[in-house]
C-alpha cells in the first residue's frame, strides 16, 4: 500500500502563488505516476496535472497550463504542485493521487482520470479570494 499526505494549502488572494506537497510513504516502488486532482463544491473531481515518477512525462489540464507546474523529488518521495497566478476558480479541495499502471496513453503523454488512480490522499483545501 501507498500512503499519500498533502500539505501546503490555505487561503490566498487572486494572483498569489501557493505550493502543494504530497508526501508518499509505504510501498513507493508501486508508484509509476502521481497526479493532482481537485474538486470544487458541487462539481465533479477533475484532473489538474500528472507526472511520471521518472519525471519524463508531464501533463496538465488546459485550465492550468502555463500557471501550474507539477514536479517530484524521488529522493524524498514527494510530489509538488506549484500554483502561480491563482484565480478564484482554482478554489477547491486538491487531492494527490498515485497510480501503479496508467491506463491511458496517446500522443506521447499519459492521461489520468480519477477512476484510474490507485491511491489517494485525504485532500487539502485551497481557497482563492477575489
Image: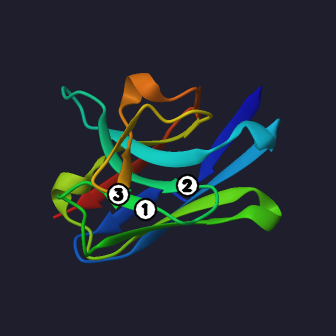
First in sequence, mark 3 or 1: give its number: 1
Q: Are marks 2 and 1 in contact (CB under 8 Å)?
A: yes
Q: Give the label on residue 52, or none.
A: 2
The crowding category of the residue bearing disc 3, from other C-alpha atoms within 10 Å (few below 14, some 14 to 19, many at least 20), is few
Q: CA distance from mark 3 to mark 1?
A: 10 Å
Identify the element where label 1 is drawn. strand
Asked whether 22 or 101 is in front, the reply is 101
Q: In the rendered image of this protein, does residue 129 appear above or below residue 101? A: below
Q: In the rendered image of this protein, does residue 91 appear above or below residue 69? A: above
| Residue shown at 35% from the left, 33% from the top | 113
x and y percentages locating residue 3 in the rendered image: 73, 34
Where the C terminus falls, by quadrant? bottom left
Q: Which residue is mark 3?
A: 108
Q: Nearer the viewer, mark 3 or mark 1?
A: 3
Q: Which residue is mark 1?
A: 58
First in sequence, mark 2 or 1: give its number: 2
| Residue shown at 50% from the left, 29% from the top | 117
Asked whether 111 or 61 is in front, the reply is 111
- In the image, 95: left or right of 48? right
Q: Nearer the viewer, mark 3 or mark 2?
A: 3
Identify the element where label 2 is drawn. strand
| Residue shown at 55% from the left, 55% from the top | 52
Report the residue that reaches farthest toward the top. Answer: 115
Amino acid at each position: 500500500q501507498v500512503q499519500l499526505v498533502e500539505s501546503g494549502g490555505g487561503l490566498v488572494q487572486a494572483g498569489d502563488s501557493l505550493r502543494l506537497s504530497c508526501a508518499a510513504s509505504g510501498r513507493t516502488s508501486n508508484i509509476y505516476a502521481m497526479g493532482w486532482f481537485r474538486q470544487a463544491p458541487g462539481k465533479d473531481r477533475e484532473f489538474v496535472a500528472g507526472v511520471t515518477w521518472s519525471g519524463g512525462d508531464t501533463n496538465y489540464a488546459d485550465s492550468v497550463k502555463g500557471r501550474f507546474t507539477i514536479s517530484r523529488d524521488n529522493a524524498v518521495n514527494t510530489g509538488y504542485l506549484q500554483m502561480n497566478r491563482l484565480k478564484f476558480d482554482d478554489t477547491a479541495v486538491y487531492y494527490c493521487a498515485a497510480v501503479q499502471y496508467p491506463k491511458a496513453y496517446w500522443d506521447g503523454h499519459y492521461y489520468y482520470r480519477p477512476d484510474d488512480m490507485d491511491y489517494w490522499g485525504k485532500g487539502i483545501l485551497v481557497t482563492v479570494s477575489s
